[in-house]
Image: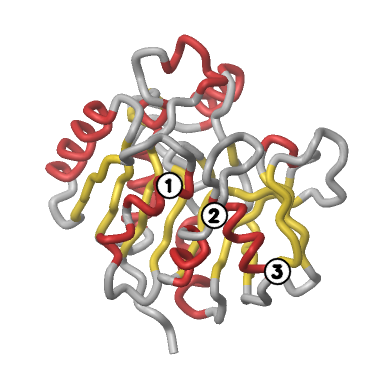
Amino acid sequence: MAAEITTAVLLAAGRGKRLGTLTAETPKPMLDIAGSPLISHIADALAAAGLTHFIVVTGYLSEQIEGWAKTWQRENPEIKITTVRQPQLNGTGGAMLAARAHLAGLPRFVFGWGDILMDRANYPRFIHHARIDEYDLMLAVNRVKDPFRGAAVYVTRHMTVERLDEKPAPGTARTEWNNAGLFATGRIIFDYLARLEPSVRGELEIPGAIAQMIADGRVVRAVDMRGFWSDVGTPEDLEKARAWFKPKGKRR
């Protein structure tokens, strides 16, 4: 039986340090891409895929993203947006824990990074799988030459995830699958997030919780993302994203 999924959590608390001065006064999710904030492209795509409630976790320069949320909801009155501030900027795990109270009673939900762009066609396909497949956690993956900037994802031929290695050293990964930053799960994720220890980077990182789920024998599945994908991590990435995305109303 298909599970009803209507809610997505967008983690938008970080600054995007690799972008340098571009994020000195603007949080990364608010950078302009083809006339709209980066996060608008994500919210638009998820809404078009049938989701009706977004929980946006803010942190760095929260007021700007909160202002965007109010404007976006006025333009999309059929969608509800809830904003919540991450009390301590201690990583993606801490950001997700900040949203926990707003997910009570939901058997499944989507969550993801609020600063990653991909081809819009990926969202309805991912949500379709999230609604009909059996899993404890589902994650989107995309192919890259070397997943050292994200997380290397090792899968079986049936796309069951066997291992997840966060930010491996360049040239060491033996897989081309990268964590694409979009997930589906239920409240089981919080059992693992609550037990997270800080990573070597001093942060509570969601991939660490997923790695423990895999180690415990939980069912973790992957869905491949196709076409354009970017973590918009550098000024060069930003320019490529601006070149690829068309202005609103003329999107691919």
- Other residues around mark 1 within 10 Å, as few (<14) / some (14–19) / many (≥20): many
> Closer to the N terminus: mark 2 or mark 1?
1
Q: Which of the two labelled residues, at mark 1 and mark 3, occupies the earlier sequence position?
A: 1
Estimate the spatial distance between the alpha carbons at disc 2 and disc 1, rounded to whole Å.
9 Å
Q: Is residue 41 left or right of residue 83?
A: right
Q: Residue at x 21, y 50 (%)?
A: 82
The quadrant of the picture occupied by the N terminus is bottom left
User: Are the two marked residues, 2 and 1, in contact with CB atoms closer than 8 angstroms?
Assistant: no
Q: Secondary structure at mark 3?
A: helix
Q: Is residue 8 above or below residue 201?
A: below
Q: Which residue: 40% across, 33% down?
A: 38
Distance CA(mark 1)–CA(mark 3): 21 Å
Q: Which residue is mark 1?
A: 94
Q: Is residue 14 rendered to the left or right of residue 211? A: left
Given residues 20 and 100, the one toward you in this image is: 100
Q: Which residue is mark 2?
A: 196
Query: How far apart in space, not on screen, are marks 2 and 3 (Cα)?
Result: 14 Å
Q: Secondary structure at mark 2?
A: loop
Residue 8: where, in percent of width, then height?
Answer: 36, 57
Judging by the rendered image, the residue that carries numbered circle 3 is 215
**Image height of 84 relative to 67, above or below:** below
Give the x, y percent position of residue 230: 58, 36
- Residue at the image position 59 percent from the left and 41 percent from the top: 229
> The disc labelled 2 sits on which kind of residue?
Leu
**What's under tag 3, amino acid-wise?**
Ala
The residue sitting at the bottom extreme is 1
Left or right placement of residue 232 versus residue 101 in this view: right
What type is the residue that disc 1 sits on? Gly
Residue beneath the point at 43% across and 56% down: 111
- Tell me the mark number nearer the camera, choosing from 2 and 1: 2
